[in-house]
Amino acid sequence: MATKIIDEYAEMMKAYEQSGGKVGEFSNPNVPSIVISGNKVLGKNEVKGLIIEPTPTKDGVDVKITVKSGTKILYPMALCFGVLPKEGTQIINMEAYIEDNAGMNAISHCVFPNAEHIVHKMRYKVHIGKHSFFRYKEIHFHGDKGGVEVVPYTEGTVGEDSYFESTFTLKEGRVGKLDIKYNVDVEKGGKLELYSKVWAKDTDEVNIEEKGNLKGEEAKALIKSRVVLEGNSHSKVVSVVNASAPYSRGHVDCMEVVRDNAVAEAVPIVGVSNELAKVTHEAAIGSLDSKEIETLQARGLTEEEAIKVVVGALLK
Amino acid sequence: MGTILEIEDLDLKKGNKYIIKDFNIEIEQNLISVILGVNGAGKSSLAYVLMGLSGYKPERGKIIFKGKDITNCSVTERAKAGMTLAWQTPANFEGLTVREYIEIGMKNKSLFSVKEALEKVALDPVLYMNRVVDKSLSGGERKRIELAAVYAMHPDLVILDEPDSGIDILSLENIKKLILDFKENGSTVLLITHRDEVAEIGDKAFLMCNGKIINEGSPAEISDFFKDECSKCDHKGAPEKSLAKNERSE
């Protein structure tokens, strides 16, 4: 049994590394971390001021993370979620409480290296107190078979003068089916930044729905998505900012690049219900700029190499 | 000193109009050859034809580079053969840093060479290396980064399409010095401009009008002709009309 768990941990670490993570983080006592494979918690490290409370369930793990008031966590927390078999379901219910005057950065790698039919659902509740911050990066690695269905839903509140930044990146391997939803309220002086970067291929399906609600005076939101589509992939990006408080400011910036037979839709929705609020948007769907490609070709890259550089930079 | 580039009887047609017609030129190795001409003379189109860009395939004629016919070669093949182009209005690249951009064309990538290239265009490497090559740069900054990138490539032939446009007077002296440095480093320069004060740094100059070379000589001679004749010329800006006239006179 112990050997099996060690093997599973090693395989998770291998996939973690393939997705760009640094394995050494999990052996550093100063770095808070958690490793979850399926519904098993394979490792956990807490640091002063940070409490990690995982509870295994039938299909996954419920995790409560609390950053205590007045604590700024020095090193970014490393999270590794994944399913190693070809088939399976993983449901992670995560609640993050960042108390007042507290802050943390976290990088989460979700790895499904052998996926043929995997469902990964992440229900995320984020509560950020006053004068606090939380930066969360989620990076996915799916292998090349496209058999993953990823459903991350995030709900949250950004407290007074606090900051929440969430970045979702899926550019290695196939996407499979992706359905992201964000719905975040921003209180007085708070700031929200949501970034989605996805490279869809073959028959991948991407659905992104991001919503920021500016409820407090001088609240701010930026919702930015970059989706590159190839083959017969399809995407729909709905970005919403509602501003109901005076001096609140929002901006939506969506760009989708289409190649081959892919299809993209972008729907920016901006709502203002206070005369002193302002929300702007920009959305662009198109092919790769031939001038960019030819510029890189004039430096000696082949067309395919140039496309890789342009797309890679766009999703960086 | 031999010929590095020969263009023979080149025609480029866009729609029903000839942009370049019966174009012939020989560019000597390791010299700065200037192509001077008013806006609309076909100078940038010539640069795009030479680099093999899409939409700029000649209808007729040959391009010989280092003794090899490259008329049907791709942009990449031409670049690998030692030719490159600095665009008049360079493209932006969201997410790509200045350092990454400059390194793309370098044979031996090194931080030292990136810094050197930026210093050549009077940009402080500390301030610029990690900036992104996107619309956050001013037109002049982007232009100088373009020149730094082609400088770092050490090409055999560099086509500089209006390197002086959008550059302030003080920076113009840096750009002129950089062009001389290209030559010093063994590159041949094909300098496209409509400013006679930039043309003066060349070794040889050609006057282009309505898609043709109509005069050649020293930069001083061609600049004088350009100032005296081209500014008064009534066919400026209407090349197709004038070309039709020339064809009739032939």
Image (spheres, coloured by chain):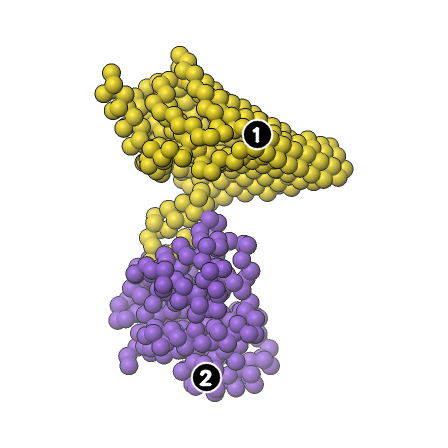
Kindly identify the residue that appears in the image at 44 percent across and 68 percent down.
B119
Horizontal relation, residue A142 to residue A245: left or right: left
Q: Are marks 1 and 2 in contact (CB under 8 Å)?
A: no
Outermost residue to the left = A3
Q: Secondary structure at mark 2?
A: helix
Q: How many marks?
A: 2
Q: Report in which chain the residue with disc 1 lies.
A: A
The colour chain A appears in is yellow
Give residue A35's position: percent from left, percent from top. Answer: 37, 26
Kindly identify the residue that appears in the image at 44 percent across and 65 percent down.
B118
> Disc 1 vs disc 2: which is toward the camera?
1
Asked whether residue A244 is in view, the answer is: yes
- Compare residues A256 and A110 and report the one nearer the observer: A110
Q: Which image quarter is the N terminus of chain A in?
A: top left
For residue A291, what is the image quadrant?
A: bottom left
Horizontal relation, residue A275 to residue A136: left or right: right
For residue A259, what is the image quadrant?
A: top left
Q: Are marks 1 and 2 on the same chain?
A: no
Horizontal relation, residue B38 to residue A174: left or right: right
Dot 2 amino acid type: Pro
Q: Secondary structure at mark 1?
A: loop
Give residue B226's position: percent from left, percent from top. Answer: 53, 82
Looking at the picture, does residue A51 appear above or below residue B239?
above
Looking at the picture, does residue A311 appear above or below residue B154?
above
Give residue A244's position: percent from left, percent from top. Answer: 71, 32
Give residue B212's position: percent from left, percent from top. Answer: 45, 75
| Residue marked by disc 2 | B219
- Compare residues B121 and A7 and report the one nearer the observer: A7
Kindly identify the residue that appears in the image at 56 percent across and 37 percent down.
A193
Chain coloured purple: B
Q: Which image quarter is the C terminus of chain A in?
A: top left
| Residue marked by disc 1 | A69
